[in-house]
Image: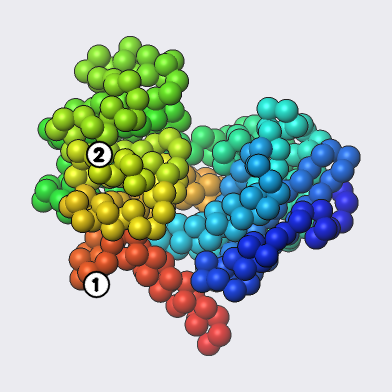
């Protein structure tokens, strides 16, 4: 493992502006990591430890530039501070990104080197899975540090977190139904799910059990075919464009890539509620006002998809599924509280969620100073 070298990643003025001077900054620590023997280049960003050690996954992605990787780590770690705060966890926000195509450069040697960098932070950052990393990868990373979650049950972990992620999204959807229609059920409602992979296919199960009518789409034909073979009542459409325009759609659940709510998609939406598992659903901050102007209720993604982080956080205390499920069930109450705050303050739900998260972090900081 080589030393951390600031020169290894050329950080331009835009990233430094984000880190030190913008309202989006405020990060406590950013670590640039390089191990030439394995080819590792990584960024670990710690946004806040006000509530406890920073917790967030490791994203493995072929970024267009090293600057883009740094910026992504900054944005994602900040989002984790807010997610963890509203999930009621005693954790701050952190995130790591490994630069490169995981299909090409991911090796055991590289993952072990990355684990050593995590260990060098002495517990300030706890890692887990994210895009491009999996349970098997965390088992390898854990061999060089003890601050790794998202491991397999055989290695002391909880395994796949998608089960509780889907359960939390379902609770957020129930809260959205309560707020929008006065009844916390999706029975008789038409729900469209874009993306029926790890999380989406579990969400289908919850909705069918609740009596919803489910419409799906996915870029992978095999994912759609698996759902249709198991549940003949489910219908499928060609793509997301067709899904958001589905007649009579009550709820739209983006469960694939970010940026699903954009200047192009929002005007076409037929649904009155948006609640899904995908991260960073708003293409830009102004989109939520567009949703509000159209009378569409938006359940902030980082609130409703927190079931996964609740699960990995619990690994640090000896994983107990029932305890985690009880915590994930509280997403229902948190989502309702956010809608109530938004209505009282005359602001969009995402802004209300931010205020509640910031209040919890500020309270923790004051408690530490006292």
- What residue sits right under mark 1 in the picture? 345
Residue 193 percent coordinates (x, y): 31, 32
Which residue is at a point 34% across and 64% down the rendered structure image?
351
Asked whether, in this view, residue 308 is left or right of residue 211, the answer is right
Element on which disc 1 rests: helix
Which residue is at a point 45% across and 30% down the rendered structure image?
198
Identify the residue at the far bottom of this view: 370
Identify the residue at the far top of this view: 229
Q: Nearer the viewer, residue 245 or 203?
A: 245
Residue 105 percent coordinates (x, y): 75, 32
Q: Nearer the viewer, residue 250 or 7?
A: 7
Q: Residues within 10 Å of mark 2 (few under 14, many from 20)?
A: some
Q: Which mark is residue 150?
A: none
Residue 232 percent coordinates (x, y): 25, 14
Q: Residues within 10 Å of mark 1 (few under 14, many from 20)?
A: few
- What residue sits right under mark 2 in the picture? 268
Identify the residue at the far front of this view: 264
Asked whether, in this view, residue 354 is left or right of residue 237, the answer is right
In 3D space, how far apart are the residues under numbered discs 1 and 2 (Cα atoms)? Answer: 28 Å
In the displayed structure, would residue 185 be above or below residue 221? Answer: below
- Quadrant location of residue 330? bottom left
Residue 151 percent coordinates (x, y): 61, 39
Q: Is residue 332 visible?
A: no
């Amino acid at each position: 493992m080589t030393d951390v070298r600031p020169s290894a990643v050329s950080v331009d003025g835009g990233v430094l502006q984000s880190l030190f001077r913008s309202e989006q900054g405020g990060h406590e620590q950013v670590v640039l990591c390089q191990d030439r023997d394995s080819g590792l280049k990584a960024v670990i960003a710690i946004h806040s430890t006000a509530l406890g050690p920073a917790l967030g996954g490791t994203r493995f992605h072929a970024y267009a530039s090293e600057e883009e990787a740094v910026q992504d780590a900054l944005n994602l770690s900040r989002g984790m501070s807010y997610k963890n705060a509203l999930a009621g966890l005693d954790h701050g926000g952190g995130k790591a990104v490994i630069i490169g195509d995981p299909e090409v450069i991911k090796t055991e040697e590289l993952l072990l080197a990355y684990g050593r960098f995590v260990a060098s932070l002495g517990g300030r950052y706890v890692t887990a899975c994210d895009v491009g990393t999996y349970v098997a990868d965390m088992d390898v990373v854990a061999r060089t540090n003890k601050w790794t979650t998202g491991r397999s049950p055989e290695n002391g972990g909880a395994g796949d977190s998608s089960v509780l992620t889907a359960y939390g999204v379902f609770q957020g959807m129930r809260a959205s139904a309560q707020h929008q229609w006065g009844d916390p059920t999706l029975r008789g409602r038409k729900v469209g799910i874009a993306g029926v992979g790890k999380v989406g296919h579990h969400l289908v199960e919850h909705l069918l059990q609740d009596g919803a009518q489910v419409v799906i789409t996915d870029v992978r034909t095999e994912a759609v075919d698996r759902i249709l073979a198991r549940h003949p009542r489910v219908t499928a459409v060609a793509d997301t464009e067709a899904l958001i325009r589905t007649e009579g759609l009550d709820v739209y659940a983006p469960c694939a890539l970010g940026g699903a709510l954009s200047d192009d998609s929002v005007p076409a939406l037929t649904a009155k509620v948006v609640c899904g598992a995908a991260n960073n659903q708003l293409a830009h901050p102004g989109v939520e006002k567009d949703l509000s102007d159209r009378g569409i209720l938006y359940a902030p993604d980082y609130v409703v998809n927190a079931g996964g982080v609740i699960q990995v956080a619990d690994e640090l205390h000896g994983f107990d599924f029932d305890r985690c499920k009880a915590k994930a069930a509280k997403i229902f109450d948190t989502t309702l509280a956010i809608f109530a705050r938004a209505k009282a303050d005359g602001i969009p739900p995402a802004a209300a969620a931010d205020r509640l998260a910031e209040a919890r972090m500020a309270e923790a900081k004051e408690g530490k100073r006292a």
